[in-house]
Amino acid sequence: MAEQKESGVLKLVDELSEAAERVGLVVRREKILREVGYRARGGACRLREKDLIIIDRDQSPAEQLEILAEALRSRDLESLYLSPAARRVVQPGPQPG
């Protein structure tokens, strides 16, 4: 059961990564180094005129999904097709359930 849920989350991560690229974001999966007492989680940034989303490749799929969704919330996604599940993740507001 947990494998099915993780598989579904991985599909959403892939879908939102593709959506990010379609709206002009570059998605990079990097190994983010950590120091004691310092917690880096990745996210959206701008580097040399490029809009990036940096994702720590060691994060869980659920954490990667949240970083992608957070970065996409400020973008106009109305012209993009997103599955209903992906659109629910990106849309701000209370989640049913």
Image: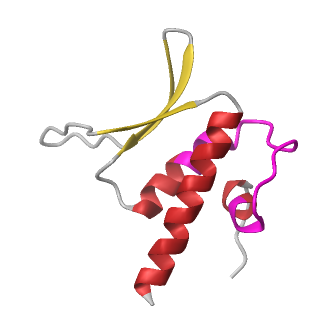
* Residue 61 on image: x %, y %: 43, 61
Give the side of residue 91 with respect to residue 4, left or right: right
Give the side of residue 63 with respect to residue 51, left or right: left
Which quadrant would the N terminus be assigned to in this image?
A: bottom left
Near-viewer residue (77 or 37): 77
Residue 41 occupies which quadrant of the picture? Answer: top left
Q: Which residues are magenta?
A: 68-86
The residue sitting at 62% across, 50% down in the picture is 16
Which quadrant would the C terminus be assigned to in this image?
A: bottom right
The residue sitting at 80% across, 37% down in the picture is 76
Q: Residue furthest left?
A: 36
Q: Height in image: 45 above or below 47?
A: below
Give the side of residue 30 with respect to residue 19, left or right: left
The residue sitting at 20% across, 37% down in the picture is 33
Near-viewer residue (69 or 25): 25
Q: Residue furthest bottom?
A: 1
Q: Residue furthest right?
A: 79
